Amino acid sequence: MSRSPISEKPLNTLSGIPMIGILLMATLAIPFLFIVHLIPVAIPWTIATFFCWFGFFIVQPNTAAVMQLFGDYKGTVRDEGLRWANPFLSKNNVSLRIRNFESSKLKVNDLEGSPIEIGAIVVWQVVDSAEAAFSVDSYENFVHVQSEAALRQSATSYPYDMHDNHTISLRSHTTEIAEHLQKEIQERLTSAGVEVLEARISHLAYAPEIAQAMLQRQQAGAIIAARSKIVEGAVSMVHMALDQLAEKGVVKLDEERKAQMVSNLLVVLCGERSTQPIINTGSIY
């Protein structure tokens, strides 16, 4: 039967400054007790005072002190400054500061099976010191390993590039991918008392062995898209030219002449090189 996770609970401790004054007076009282021959009181008094001096500890800003008594978790101290507690309590400091983790460049396959290189930056913070200290062996290493595992999972869930307006891809939908990646990492790190503040892709590229081929495919796609726009515009211009010629009665063209004119205009408008004009001095009829 698995044990329930240990959650953080506050532990009340004493301010260290007043305790210094109290222990100083207790220490100065030791010689007096021996002088007046109160040996039964002086010996335990001396031992207790000596051990009490080991109860001081310092809590840095944005740091939590996890306290244990012979292996039993007693609570967490977040009060900053010099504090005093039971000297037999062991103290384990856990940083609550916001930290960055940049993953290595991972080589994975995207949704379409294309090998890609991907890396991410994760901004995280410990929010439950007890879970961070007791749920995992090393919460820092746990963050690194689980973040890279979540990054691999996210990379295999989407294609590198989109092929239509309804496809979410790694390269074009950075906001959606970042939200999905943050959710994936958070689900893995909740048990360690860690909150993921932000997760974003820092590196994204095709693997070297297919990078040249994919670049050519992207260039071909860009050329096709540009040509489609050019043809669409050329057809509109030809249609407008024929309508205006007919509307203003500039010239009357039969179907054969219209077809020839359309062919010539499309060649001029869609061609990559400039055309050489040919002047026809004869009749077009």
Image (cartoon, rainbow, N blue to C red):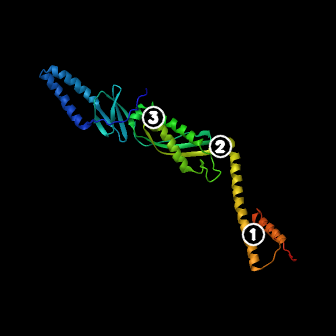
For the C terminus, which image quadrant?
A: bottom right
Where's residue 105, x and y in %? 58, 40
Q: Outermost residue toward the left? A: 36
Front residue of this view, candidates 283 and 91: 283
Where's residue 124, x and y in %? 46, 42
- Asked if one can make out residue 276 in the rendered structure from this viewpoint, the answer is no
The residues bearing labels 2 and 1 have C-alpha atoms spaced at a distance of: 41 Å
Residue located beneath label 2 in the image: 112
Front residue of this view, candidates 155 and 107: 155
Compared to residue 238, the image places residue 251 above or below, namely below
Residue located beneath label 1 in the image: 238
Q: Outermost residue toward the bottom? A: 249
242 left or right, relative to 174: right
For the N terminus, which image quadrant?
A: top left
Compared to residue 99, the image places residue 277 above or below, namely below
Type of amino acid at the residue the image marks with label 3: Tyr
First in sequence: mark 2 vs mark 1: 2
